[in-house]
Image (cartoon, rainbow, N blue to C red):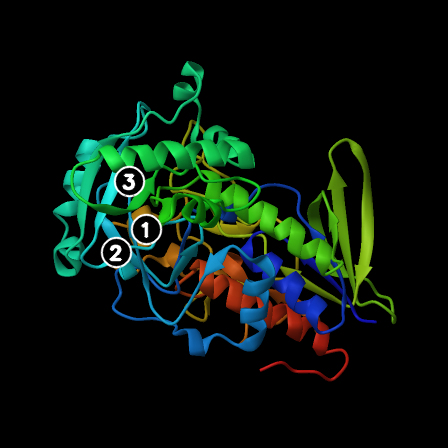
Amino acid sequence: MTSVVVIGGGVAGTAAALGAAQVGASVTLIAGGRGASALSGGAIDDIAWDEPAGISPDDLAPLARAVLDALGGYRVGARRTLHAVTTGLLRPARGCDAALLDLEPLAGRTILVPDIDHAAWDAETLASAWSATPHARELRLGFVAGRAPIFRRSEERSFTEAEVAMLHDDPARLSWLAARLREARAAAPGDATAIVLPRWLGVSRERATDLSNLVGFPCGEALGGVGGPSGLRFEQSRKRALEIARVIVVDAWATRVSESGSSEQGWRVELAHGEAPAERIGADAVVLATGGILGGGLEYTPAGSFLGPDVPEVPRPLLRATCEAPVRLGARGVRLDDPSSLFGAAPETHAWPYVEEPLLDHAGVLVRGHGEVIDAPSGLFATGELAAGPAHTWLRALAHGAKVGAFAAGQHVGVVPN
C-alpha cells in the first residue's frame, strides 16, 4: 500500500489527506497547530468574491465533491449564495458554511434582525445598512430589528461568539432559543419570514438547520470576519472526516523533509513534539500544505528588518519555507531572486496597496499541474496557499488539495486522477 504524509491540517491539507485515502493510500496527516482555515468566516469562494463568475458546481471534479461531502456542513450548489455581513454589506459567495443564512432564495421577504443585548451586535444599525444595499434593493429584501431577549443568564451577555455558539450545541438550549425567536417574530413589526443571527449556532456542528426546523422558517448566522465558530466547526468536521477515512493524525511540527535514501520509501519527515525527542517517519510521497504567510508555512522578511548599528552580513530572501524541504520559491512561474539590498526588498515592489497585482498574492513553492514540486525528486508535492499561484481561495484550495493528494498516492500505482 502506498504511504503518503500530508503536512498541514487546513482545508488544502485535509483535502489532500482525504483524496489520497480515497484512492487507497495509507495516509498520515501532520497537524501541529491551527492555521488559516481555522480563521474562516464561513463564506466559500473560488475567486475573489466581487468577481462576476468563478467555478461552477459542474466544474468541481468528482474527487473534490467527494471531499466536500465527507466534510459535511457546507453548501456548494447550482447557484451562488448571498450573505449579510456584520460590516453592513450583503455579499455573494460560491457557497457557505451551512450555519449561514442564505438570502438568495428569500427574494421579496422581510428578515428579522433580533435586537440582542450584546456588544458585538447592533440590530438597528445592521438592519438599516443591509436594507440600503444594492443587493437588497434588487431582491426586494427588507430587514427589521425586533427585541429578542434570548440570554438565559446575565453573564452570557459578555460571552464571546464561540462561547455562545457552544451553548447551542445543547438541544435543550437550542429549543429554548427557538421559542424566544418565535416570540420575537410575533412581536416584531412587519411580517418577517426569516431570521439572521450573530455567529452563535453551534461549534461541534452547524445548528442552523435544526433551529430552522424548530422555528418553522429559515434561520442562520450573519457572515463575520476572521475567527469565530465557523473555523471551529471546520476543525470538528475535519476530525470526523479523517476518522472515517482512517487517516492517522499526528499532533507535531514537521521541521524537515528530505530524501530517505531507502529503496522502499523515498522520503523522510522529521517531526518535533515540544520537548520530546525528534521523530522520523518515512513515506512514498509527501504533500506540503503548511499554508502561506498567515498560516505559518511561509516566513516573510520585510524591508529594513535588520536596520541597526551594524550592516547585515548577507541579504535575506523575501520569503522562506518554514519547513525545510528541497523546494524553490517563486511567483508567476519565476524563481524569487535574492534582494538587491542587504536590507531586504522594498515593500512597494511586492505588497498591496502599492501595486495592483501584489507579488505576495502569487508567491510560494513552484509546482506543476498536479502539485509536483518543480526541480525536486519524484514524490514531493505542494498545495494550498503554500503553492505559488493566484486565487488562494477556500474552494480552490480544497479542489487542488484533493487532486494533489490523489495524484501523490496514485503515481506509485499507475493511477492518475482527472
Query: Residue lying furthest top in this view?
Result: 154
Query: Where residue 416 sits: x, y (%)?
Result: 65, 82
Q: Which residue is mark 3?
A: 86
Query: Where residue 338 sits: x, y (%)?
Result: 47, 55
Image quadrant containing the N terminus: bottom right
In depth, the one of 375 and 196 nearer the eye is 196
Circle 2 residues within 10 Å: few <14, some 14–19, many ≥20: few
Please name the amino acid that badge 3 sits on.
Thr
Residue at image point 53% right, 52% down = 291
Residue at image point 12% right, 47% down = 132
Report the disc number at residue 351: 1
Q: CA separation, marks 3 and 2?
A: 29 Å
Q: Is residue 158 visible?
A: yes
Q: CA separation, marks 1 and 3?
A: 27 Å
Local secondary structure at mark 3 = loop
In depth, the one of 201 and 347 nearer the eye is 201
Image quadrant containing the C terminus: bottom right
Local secondary structure at mark 1 = loop
Residue at image point 42% right, 73% down = 57
Please name the amino acid that badge 1 sits on.
Ala
Q: Which residue is mark 2?
A: 355
Local secondary structure at mark 2 = loop
**Does 105 appear above or below 146?**
below
Query: Where residue 417 sits: x, y (%)?
Result: 62, 80
**Does 246 appear above or below 111?**
below
Query: Where residue 265 sits: x, y (%)?
Result: 83, 67
Q: Is residue 189 left or right of residue 147?
A: left
Q: Earlier in the sequence, mark 1 or mark 3?
A: 3
- The answer to whether the residues at label 2 and label 1 have Cβ atoms under 8 Å apart is yes
In depth, the one of 344 and 251 nearer the eye is 251
Please name the amino acid that badge 2 sits on.
Val
Q: From the image, state whether disc 1 or disc 3 is nearer to you.
A: 3
